[in-house]
Amino acid sequence: MRIQILATALLVAPLLQAAKPLEVYFIDVEGGQSTLIVSPSGQSLLIDTGWRGYNNRDTERILAAAKNAHIKQIDYVLITHYHTDHVGGVMQLADKIKIGTFVDHGPNREDSKITREDYADYERTLPRAHHLVLKPGDKVPVKGLDVTALSADGALIASPMPGAGQPNPACATAEKKEVDPSENARSLGTLITFGSFRMLDLGDLTWNKELGLVCPNNLIGTVDVYLTSHHGLAQSGSPQLVDAIHPRVAIMNNGAKKGGEPSAWQIVKDSPGLEDLWQIHYSLAGGADHNARDSYIANVDEICEGKSIKLTAQADGSFTVYNARNKFEHAYPAKAH
């Protein structure tokens, strides 16, 4: 009898493991970025750490998400670029939770005082963990996921992702903007794949670099979820990019007074095939005409409790999105890309 029970357990265990979902927590760091991704394997990836200071506000919100995800360490912390709203909180976070590996695009390239200071703090934190520098096409080795770098240190993938590479007719009307010399243009952007589910996070990659990923051919392909570039600022998120990736759902990690610009918001809203646009904050600049419906906004007041948005995805491509403020949840059935 004991042997039979053991044999049954050995057969059932892989099925239970396979049935575990991917969990993604879009944490409110008030117009910065911090996204916690937990693989069905139990390994975790945190993309960016929010701001420094504010009485450890952003670190505490990250730790709360980690607690909800039942993880006691963060296996990989990926820093998209060295602006303070993305890397500023790294030292505070490293003081509070074990980090396995830091992932980045290599050295800081921006000559500004605050960015040099934030990068110096990051360098002082690096010896606490392993360190991995990615080039376009490289992967973050999170068990159970495919996390591929599409952009890094100003360079872009040269070959299309599987299933991508089609000509993008919208490129005929594309207009470039002024060259961006900042760290934004060097953002470490990633495509995260779990079975049939695909999510795009390009950090703060700016307009011209984004065009290089989708013009003249779409090297990314289509995605289920698009974390809007640059918090919904008009320096990013061209219609050529947004229409090419054809997201079903967009999530905007804006703040009350940062991001969520009406022109950028409208490009996302008008994307063909978009089912819903979710926001971390109500945008004061957007007003009544350029904000999502109340149910789809995690924080409606400028002074808020820092509520998050949680996404749960299955390997067949189906997923749900949950608003921690009002407990509203919407389910999205699997669809073929």
Image: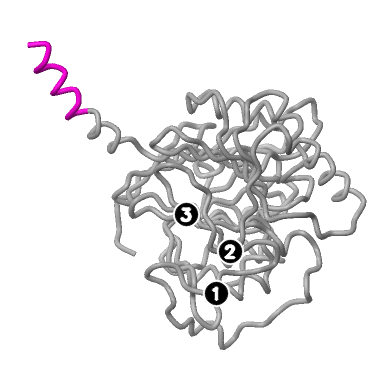
5 inside magenta stretch: yes
Measured in 3D between alpha carbons, the distance from the residue under mark 2 to the one under mark 3, in whole angstroms, is 17 Å
User: Does residue 122 appear left or right of residue 248 in this picture?
Assistant: right
Q: Nearer the viewer, mark 1 or mark 3?
A: 1
Measured in 3D between alpha carbons, the distance from the residue under mark 1 to the one under mark 3, in whole angstroms, is 20 Å
88 inside magenta stretch: no
Q: Quadrant of residue 212?
A: bottom right
Q: Depth check: give the residue in front, 203 or 121.
A: 121
Give the amino acid at mark 3.
Met
Q: Point out the tag, 1 or 2, that comes first from the N-terminus.
A: 2
Identify the residue position indicated by label 1 in the image: 158
Q: Position of residue 82 (x, y in %)?
A: 76, 50
Q: Which residues are magenta?
A: 1-12
Pointer 2 local density, CA inside 10 Å: few below 14, some 14–19, many at least 20: many
Identify the residue position indicated by label 2 in the image: 136
Contact check, label 2 and label 3, Cβ < 8 Å: no
The residue that appears at 30% across and 33% down in the rendered structure is 17
Q: Is residue 286 visible?
A: no
Identify the residue position indicated by label 3 in the image: 199
Q: Depth check: give the residue in front, 328 or 111.
A: 111
The residue that appears at 80% across and 30% down in the rendered structure is 54
Contact check, label 1 and label 2, Cβ < 8 Å: yes
